[in-house]
Image (tube, rainbow, N blue to C red):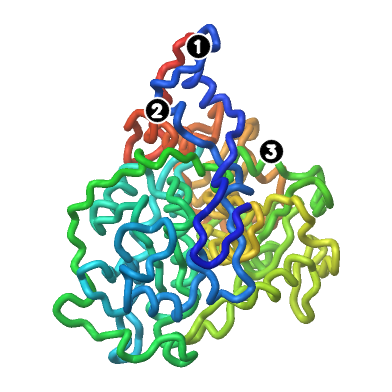
């Protein structure tokens, strides 16, 4: 876990984990290290190394969750106010225009401060994990490089601030998607910030003034130059542990629908109680419910006033939720009962969070990984994937998976089957008997070391094993 203080660079950004794919690159048949290989230079970070802990006062943060006060100071005097370790420009990626006239965009100077409109659709991609094709996954390497080129981002020098613009839960979710994609591909925590709250809230709360914003005008928002030259391949860090794959999820589930304490795992369902319990359906799935052992706490509890302002609650409040020590709302288990104080998150647990498409879970994940500094993984396939992988029929009358597929998640879930088969959309099953469901992570690792990988996902292969096999 990283901790931060004002104007202090990161220290000890990662630990090297033993992993078969790295051993394949680092050693020849005799076991000697191949230092000429790009993989020999890559640090593999654990979820604990990727997480960052916020200051109790968000005004004291210079990356992670920051305030309008910090953004104003930066943009008004960037060259003198740049955080330690940042030598490039300030790039503000605003997800949408603010709704109030004159406050649509954070005003850039288009010299060293730029504000671009970057919709959330740019930061997701439909990809295959080898078993099933799923929407809204982390973009592949080629897509990420295209975004760095479009906005001329140098991820090793620039500060990237992701701003909502308009206050809404969907824009808060999208902020998390951008942070997740950049961190997953190896951008250091010190280079990414999330502006807490909407443009309107910055003014209402006194963090910024009306003059810090502008309506659309010449040069506002900035025009994406599409001339960047950086690549995620230059980021010699493997943060793919941020993504919990289907395979990972199936491996960590308990034997029964119980939150087992002190097992190192905390599974957080960020959806509504009705979806968690299987009482309502989304995305034309064959069923609704939850994986065994998951606890539910709606993502909206992490935020305040998302009708207009939409900002994260205090660090103390977010910690109270994790401790099960909050009145009126808290984690519930499969019995629909609150788990109570001491029976929610346990010290040392890795948080596994999800929703239907891991948009809502970006908010819970920001709370745990960016504010509280807890090791966190996002099940990116989420319930739109999980609730599809069953021996149940779709609207065409075909079973989605055969009865003997090893990827049937219905056998490790508590769920209600869809009663109306006409509502069950067919899913794209790539291989019901695939040997692995980690194709996306494998492809993305391969992109870093060899430039391989296909834009469709799931097709990339690691370089050949020099020892054969």
Task: Identify the mark at residue 259; answer none if there is no mark.
Answer: none
Q: Position of residue 294 (x, y in %)?
A: 72, 55
Left or right: 218 as drawn, with respect to 460: left
Measure the alpha-carbon separation of dots 2 and 3.
Answer: 30 Å
For the view shown, which residue lies furthest in the front direction? 80
Q: Which corner quadrant of the image does residue 222 belong to?
A: bottom left
Query: Can the viewer see residue 130 in this picture?
Result: no
User: Which residue occupies 58% across, 28% down?
Assistant: 19
User: Which residue occupies 54% across, 54% down?
Assistant: 384
> Mark 2 packing: few (<14 Cα in 10 Å), some, or many (20+)?
some
Residue under label 3, please give it: 251
Residue 432 sits above or below residue 338 on the image: above
User: Which residue occupies 77% across, 81% down?
Assistant: 328
For the view shown, which residue lies furthest in the left direction? 218
Task: Tell me which numbered mark, 1 or 2, is placed earlier along the sequence.
Answer: 2
Residue under label 2, please give it: 38
Q: Where is residue 218 in the image (x, y as percent from the top left)?
A: 14, 79
Q: Position of residue 232 (x, y in %)?
A: 36, 43
For the view shown, which residue lies furthest in the top direction? 30
């Amino acid at each position: 876990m990283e901790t931060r203080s004002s104007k202090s660079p990161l220290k000890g950004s990662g630990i090297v984990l033993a992993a078969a794919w790295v051993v394949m690159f680092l050693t020849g048949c005799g076991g000697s290290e191949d230092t000429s290989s790009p993989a020999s230079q890559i640090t593999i970070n654990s979820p604990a190394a990727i997480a960052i802990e916020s200051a109790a006062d968000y005004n004291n943060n210079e990356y992670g969750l920051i305030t309008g006060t910090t953004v104003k100071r930066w943009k008004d005097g960037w060259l003198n106010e740049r955080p330690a370790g940042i030598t490039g420009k300030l790039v503000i990626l605003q997800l949408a225009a603010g709704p109030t006239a004159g406050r649509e965009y954070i005003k850039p100077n288009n010299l060293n401060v730029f504000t671009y409109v970057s919709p959330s659709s740019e930061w997701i991609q439909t990809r295959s994990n080898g078993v099933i094709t799923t929407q809204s996954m982390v973009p592949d390497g080629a897509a990420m490089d295209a975004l760095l080129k479009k906005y001329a981002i140098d991820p090793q020098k620039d500060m990237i601030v992701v701003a909502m613009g308009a206050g809404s839960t969907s824009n808060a979710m999208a902020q998390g998607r951008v942070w997740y994609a950049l961190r997953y591909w190896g951008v250091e925590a010190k280079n990414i910030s999330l502006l807490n709250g909407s443009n309107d809230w910055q003014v209402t709360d006194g963090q910024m003034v009306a003059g810090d914003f502008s309506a659309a005008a010449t040069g506002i928002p900035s025009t994406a130059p599409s001339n960047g030259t950086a690549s995620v391949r230059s980021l010699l860090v493997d943060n793919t542990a941020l993504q919990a794959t289907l395979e990972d999820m199936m491996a960590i589930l308990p034997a029964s629908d119980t939150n087992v304490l002190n097992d190192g795992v905390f599974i957080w369902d960020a959806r509504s109680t009705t979806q968690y319990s299987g009482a309502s359906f989304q995305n034309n799935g064959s069923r609704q419910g939850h994986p065994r052992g998951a606890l539910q706490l709606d993502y909206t509890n992490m935020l305040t006033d998302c009708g207009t302002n939409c900002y994260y609650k205090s660090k103390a409040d977010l910690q109270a939720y994790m401790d099960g020590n909050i009145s009126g709302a808290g984690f519930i288990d499969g019995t629909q009962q609150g788990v109570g104080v001491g029976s929610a998150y346990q010290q040392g647990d890795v948080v596994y969070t999800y929703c239907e498409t891991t948009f809502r879970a970006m908010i819970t994940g920001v709370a745990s990984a960016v504010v509280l500094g807890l090791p966190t993984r996002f099940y990116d396939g989420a319930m739109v994937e999980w609730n599809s992988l069953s021996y149940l029929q779709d609207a065409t009358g075909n079973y989605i998976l055969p009865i003997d597929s090893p990827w049937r998640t219905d056998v490790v879930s508590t769920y209600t089957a869809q009663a109306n088969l006409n509502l069950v959309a067919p899913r794209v099953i790539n291989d019901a008997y695939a040997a692995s469901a980690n194709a996306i992570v494998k492809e993305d690792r391969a992109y870093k070391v060899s430039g391989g990988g296909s834009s469709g996902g799931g097709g990339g292969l690691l370089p050949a094993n020099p020892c054969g096999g």
